[in-house]
Image (spheres, rainbow, N blue to C red):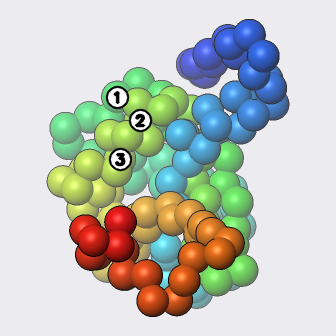
Amino acid sequence: MIVTTVAPKHGEDPRLTRDLERKKRQTLLELNPDETTTKSITELKEKIDAALNSMSPSPPEGAKVQEINKLRNGGIILQLVSKEAADWLRDPINELAFTSKLDDNTYIRNRVYLILVPRVPLTLDPNSQEHL
């Protein structure tokens, strides 16, 4: 198993650095809700690893499932062994090939971050250059 880590810079919190590295190896996978409720984590891991191994072109080294976390909405957070494998999987061509091996309704969802900004007027239009 190959796990790449980056030494924290002076003054950085090592836990924050570790968490950021872990998130770079994660992918949010939306599956059929029946799939996630009826199958165990071990069964899902085996199915996903089999799909990765059967892909052409071959995925990079480290394209193995390290951890799976089930979400309440039926999706899963898939953590791969390497960041390169996660980046490779997010490529649209590889994503389509991978998800088609799992199920027709499976897709990879981009991670979004909600940001709350205090004291911004409701009339602000972020698409307007004048407002920016």
The residue drawn where x is 50% and y is 54% is: 27
Point out the tag, 1 or 3, that comes first from the N-terminus.
Answer: 1
Q: Check disc 3 and give the amino acid type.
A: Leu
Task: Left or right? Give the position of 32 relative to 105.
Answer: right
Question: Which residue is identified by label 3?
Answer: 89
Is residue 100 shown above or below 38? above
**Mark 1 vs mark 3, CA separation in Å:** 10 Å
11 and 90: which one is in front? 11
Kindly state the secondary structure of the residue where label 2 is placed: helix
Tag 2: amino acid:
Ala
Q: Quadrant of the N terminus?
A: top right
Between 81 and 17, the one nearer to me in the picture: 17
Secondary structure under tag 3 reads helix
The answer to whether residue 54 is visible is no
Where is mark 2, residue-wise? 85
Percent across and percent down for residue 66 are: 63, 40
Dot 1 amino acid type:
Pro
Total marks shown come to 3
**Image coords of residue 52 (percent x, y):** 38, 46
CB under 8 Å between callouts 2 and 3? yes
Q: CA distance from mark 2 to mark 3?
A: 6 Å
Left or right, 106 with respect to 82, comes to left
Residue 114 pos. (x, y %): 59, 69
- Whether pointer 1 and pointer 3 mark residues with C-beta atoms closer than 8 Å, the reply is no
Dots 1 and 2: beta carbons under 8 Å?
Answer: yes
Residue 103 in the image, given as x and y percentages of width and height: 37, 74
Who's the residue at 32% across and 40% down the image?
A: 88
- Check disc 1 and report the residue beneath it: 60
Residue at horizontal 54 percent and vertical 40 percent from the top:
25
Is residue 68 shown to the viewer in this render?
Answer: yes
Mark 2 neighbour density, 10 Å: few (under 14) some (14–19) many (20 or more): many
